């Protein structure tokens, strides 16, 4: 398990239910992204607009159920951010 992926997942899981929705990813990256980047928990280039955040969500949501589990999220961010 990537500790960085877990920390980022937990920061984006706004309601604490253990899965990420598209709205959570977009909202959390918009509101928390700059702070997460400043602390090194997210690459600066990972802070993006709603369309890019939505595309990241789509790539990670392999089973198409509309939510990201930690495992789906970890696989995508580890690949994308090189963790």
Image (tube, rainbow, N blue to C red):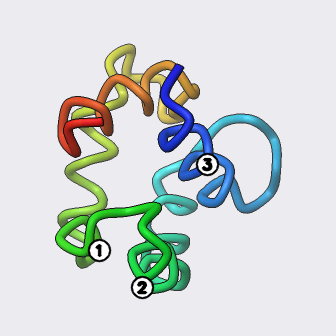
- Residue, far top: 63
Q: How many numbered circles are shown?
A: 3
Q: Position of residue 40 (x, y in %)?
A: 42, 67
Residue 47 - label: 1
Q: Position of residue 59 (x, y in %)?
A: 22, 34
Find residue 81 and report its image quarter. Answer: top left
Please identify, in this view, whether the residue under mark 3 or under mark 1 is nearer the observer: 3
Residue drawn 46% across the image and 53% down it = 22
Residue 34 - label: 2
Neighbourhood count class around disc 2 (C-alpha, 10 Å): few under 14, some 14–19, many 20 upward: some
Decide which of tag 1 and tag 2 comes sooner along the chain.
2
Neighbourhood count class around disc 1 (C-alpha, 10 Å): few under 14, some 14–19, many 20 upward: some
SS of the residue under disc 2: helix
Decide which of tag 3 and tag 1 comes sooner along the chain.
3
The answer to whether residue 76 is above or below residue 22 is: above
Image quarter of the C terminus: top left
Residue 56 - label: none
Residue drawn 30% across the image and 32% down it = 78
Label 2, label 3: how far apart the Cα atoms are: 15 Å
Q: Position of residue 67 (x, y in %)?
A: 54, 34
Q: Mark 1 and 2 residues: CB-CB less than 8 Å, in contact?
A: yes
Label 3, label 1: how far apart the Cα atoms are: 16 Å
Does 39 sit left or right of 62 as displayed? right
SS of the residue under disc 1: loop
Q: Mark 3 and 1 residues: CB-CB less than 8 Å, in contact?
A: no
The answer to whether residue 44 is above or below residue 19 is: below
Neighbourhood count class around disc 3 (C-alpha, 10 Å): few under 14, some 14–19, many 20 upward: few
Find residue 48 and report its image quarter. Answer: bottom left
Does 50 sit left or right of 36 as displayed? left
Residue 7 - label: 3
Decide which of tag 2 and tag 3 comes sooner along the chain.
3
SS of the residue under disc 3: helix
């Amino acid at each position: 398990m990537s500790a960085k992926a877990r920390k980022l997942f937990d920061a984006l899981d706004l309601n604490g239910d253990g899965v990420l929705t598209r709205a959570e990813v977009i909202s959390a990256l918009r509101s928390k992204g700059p702070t997460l980047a400043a602390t090194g928990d997210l690459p600066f280039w990972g802070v993006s607009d709603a369309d890019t955040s939505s595309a990241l969500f789509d790539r990670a949501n392999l089973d198409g159920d509309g939510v990201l589990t930690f495992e789906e999220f970890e696989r995508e961010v580890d690949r994308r951010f090189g963790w």
